[in-house]
């Protein structure tokens, strides 16, 4: 019996390499799918759609740069037109980060609320929080569901929700919006914020979204929380100085950041979105079977200068 058992064990051991070869390959993770996406599946972001924010250096003297991608048409173009004018006028130079509310937003602008705005800014009506539904252009994500809208998906690389007739961008992590006072005020675009916590989807259709942070969010999300109401800083010493905010096209060409996003109409994105909703890579035991739209962030990557 002993010799037979040893023989069986030896045979099993010899068979292991063959069995390993026959084992199915592990399902790729979302990151691996993105890394394998061909160059043709990536879309360049125009420099004219990039807003570059430079904060004062941190306590260690390190530079802090944040890059914001402005939202394309049809969304929020009145506010974005104002933002372009504010950047061209260098209006934000010398302003500051004034609010950091835990699990919510970081907000910046003129803390005194007395700095004169440049000429030519428009007043945007509340009706512009919504846009006409872009039929035939939207990638529907059946796994991306929720209580805030009957449909969710992506349009030209942006997370959106819609009904039969209207469509709007949604408040996911790192999205950038326009601060405002009570209705009917809609904000000029001079006061901006970005989401640093759980997606505050209740703000959808109640405030203008104008872009998203695509680089440097860590410089904002790691700031000390404000001690005043709603996370506002109470003293000038607490506020974080803004050195400048420019459109990338205002910078020397060699200093202009370059980014691209994974086309949301590509097969690579379809595989990525499915993998985000149904994790099958080795760590996961049970695929979730779905995901919130904000848990399927559109991949964006920096492009190295050639």
Image (tube, grey):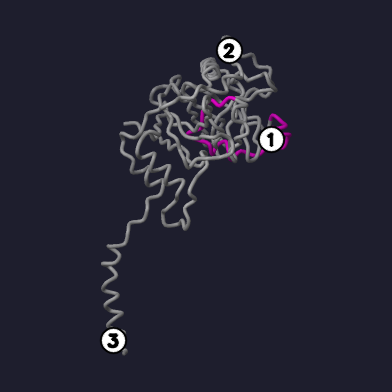
Residue ID for mark 2: 122
What is the crowding at mark 1: few (fewer than 14 residues within 10 Å), some, or many (at least 20)?
some
In depth, the one of 116 and 290 nearer the eye is: 290
First-in-chain label (1 vs 2): 2
In space, the residues marked 3 and 1 are separated at their CA atoms by 74 Å
Nearer to me, 256 or 288: 288
- Residue at the spot of label 3: 4
Say which residue appears at 43% left-offset and 42% top-offset: 273
- The mark lying in front, picked from 2 and 3, is 3
Write down the quadrant of residue 108 in the picture. top right
Measuring 33% from the left and 40% from the top, which residue is drawn there? 37
Q: Is mark 2 on a helix, strand or loop?
A: loop
Q: Give the range drawn in magenta.
A: 208-236
From the image, state whether disc 1 or disc 2 is nearer to you.
2
Q: Position of residue 112 (x, y in %)?
A: 69, 21
Where's residue 292, x and y in %?
Answer: 52, 41
Q: How crowded is mark 2: few (under 14 residues within 10 Å), some or many (20 or more)?
A: few
Marks 1 and 2, how far apart in space? 29 Å
User: Which residue was labeled with disc 1?
Assistant: 231
Horizontal arrangement in the rendering, residue 154 relative to residue 118 (left or right): left
Separation (CA) of disc 2 from disc 3? 88 Å
In the image, what residue occupies the spot 61% across and 38% down? Answer: 223
In the rendered view of the protein, which quadrant contains the N terminus? Answer: bottom left
Q: Do the residues labelled 2 and 3 touch (CB within 8 Å)?
A: no
């Amino acid at each position: 019996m002993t010799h037979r058992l040893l023989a069986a064990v030896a045979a099993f051991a010899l068979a292991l390499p063959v069995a390993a070869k026959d084992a199915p390959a592990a399902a790729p993770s979302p990151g691996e799918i993105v890394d394998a996406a061909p160059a043709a599946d990536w879309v360049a972001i125009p420099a004219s759609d990039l807003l570059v924010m430079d904060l004062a250096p941190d306590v260690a003297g390190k530079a802090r740069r944040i890059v914001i991608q402005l939202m394309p048409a049809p969304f929020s173009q009145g506010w974005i037109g104002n933002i372009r004018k504010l950047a061209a006028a260098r209006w934000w130079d010398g302003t500051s980060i004034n609010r950091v509310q835990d699990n919510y937003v970081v907000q910046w602008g003129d803390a005194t609320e007395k700095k004169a705005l440049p000429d030519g800014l428009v007043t945007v009506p509340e009706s512009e929080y919504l846009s006409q539904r872009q039929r035939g252009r939207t990638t529907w994500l059946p796994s991306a569901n929720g209580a805030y809208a009957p449909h969710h998906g992506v349009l030209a690389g942006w997370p959106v929700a819609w009904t039969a007739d209207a469509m709007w961008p949604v408040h996911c992590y790192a999205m950038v919006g326009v601060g405002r006072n009570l209705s009917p005020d809609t904000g000029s675009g001079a006061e901006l914020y970005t989401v640093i916590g759980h997606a505050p989807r209740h703000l959808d259709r109640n405030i203008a979204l104008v872009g998203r942070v695509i680089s440097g969010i860590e410089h904002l999300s790691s700031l000390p929380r404000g001690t005043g109401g709603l996370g506002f800083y109470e003293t000038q010493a607490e506020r974080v100085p803004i050195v400048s905010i420019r459109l990338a096209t205002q910078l020397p060409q060699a200093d202009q950041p370059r980014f691209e996003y994974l086309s949301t109409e590509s097969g690579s994105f379809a595989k990525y979105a499915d993998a985000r909703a149904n994790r099958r890579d080795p760590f996961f035991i049970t695929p979730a079977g779905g995901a919130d739209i904000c848990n399927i962030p559109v991949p964006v990557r920096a492009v190295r200068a050639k």
